[in-house]
Image (cartoon, rainbow, N blue to C red):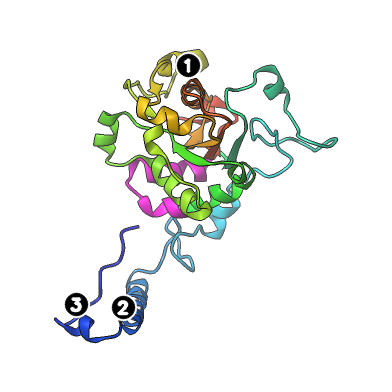
Amino acid sequence: MTPLPEPWPAPAGEAEALPPALASRLRGLARRLWGGLVDVALPPGCMVCRAAVDAPGCLCGACWSRLAFIAPPICDRLGTPLPYGFGEGRLLSPAAREAPPAYGRARAVAAFGEVTRDLIHALKYADRLDVAPPMGRMMARAGADILADAQALVPVPLHRLRLWRRRFNQSAALAGVIGRETGLPVRAGWLERRRATRPQVGLDRAARARNVQGAFAVPDMAKGELRGRRLVLVDDVLTTGATIDACVKALQRAGAGQVDVLVFARVADEADAPIS
């Protein structure tokens, strides 16, 4: 969210005349007073439906209740919910056993649905950077186990032409929040999208894989830094996994160690996800 402007400028020479600690307290008080005035004039609204909420960056009760949070028991590899837990140790779904992905483990806040779709679209297409901090904080909690083992965060990159049109990378914005929450460094320069690809919307699994084949690479200058590192790849949504797998394989070819994945939403059925 864009920082609030200073409510009034300090008179010339006044800041120098005050002790630094007192000047800092006065500036903080002025910001809080200004923020309170803004909240009165523009009361906070739900991030999705704009219904009144108690504080900015929140969901109303109705939207919160429609979020299908992913909670244990889950498949340790895919991060998908399981109908019940059984035995001890790591649980694996039949899908993970039959077709294991390139990444080690994936974690997501919620299953893809109306609310997660609206939040992702708001961030991705409507320049709603105000939703990135709460989304990122939820991701940090959902991925606590894989983040505890990680050494760096790598956002899924955009091609430079798409980045120019969109003006920001939503995955990098989410990674920045997660980094601040966990203290992990964000290494956006460790992975590049060197080939522009068509949107994945409407493509089947095989076509999606072909579409992103060879699109990602690690710059030569980054290979020495990431060699052997435990990384968490950050994106907004995981659909068929074609883009994620292409990114993971590029990192692995460059010498990365464990590569896990953290997303906001996880799609169980490809037909439910009209997102590139």
Query: Which residue is tagged 2?
Result: 27
Whether residue 276 is visible: no
Confirm whether the magenta stretch covers residue 265: no
Q: Amino acid at mark 1?
A: Ala
Q: Amino acid at mark 3?
A: Pro
Disc 2 or disc 1, which is closer to the eye? 2
Q: Residues within 10 Å of mark 2 (few under 14, many from 20)?
A: some
Q: Amino acid at mark 2?
A: Arg
- Estimate the x, y position of residue 42 in percent, counting from the top left: 34, 69
Query: Which residue is tagged 1?
Result: 209
Query: What's the CA distance linking mark 2 and mark 3?
Result: 10 Å
Question: Start and end of the magenta stretch?
Answer: 113-133
Which quarter of the image is occupied by the N terminus?
A: bottom left
Q: Main secondary structure of the magenta part?
A: helix
Residue at 54%, 47% (x, y): give it. Answer: 139
Whichever of callouts 3 and 1 sits on the residue coming sooner in the sequence is: 3
Looking at the image, residue 97 lies above or below residue 40: above
Which quarter of the image is occupied by the C terminus?
A: top left
50 sits to left or right of 6: right
Disc 3 or disc 1, which is closer to the eye? 3
Query: Which residue is tagged 3?
Result: 9
Confirm whether the magenta stretch covers residue 125: yes
Whether residue 270 is visible: yes
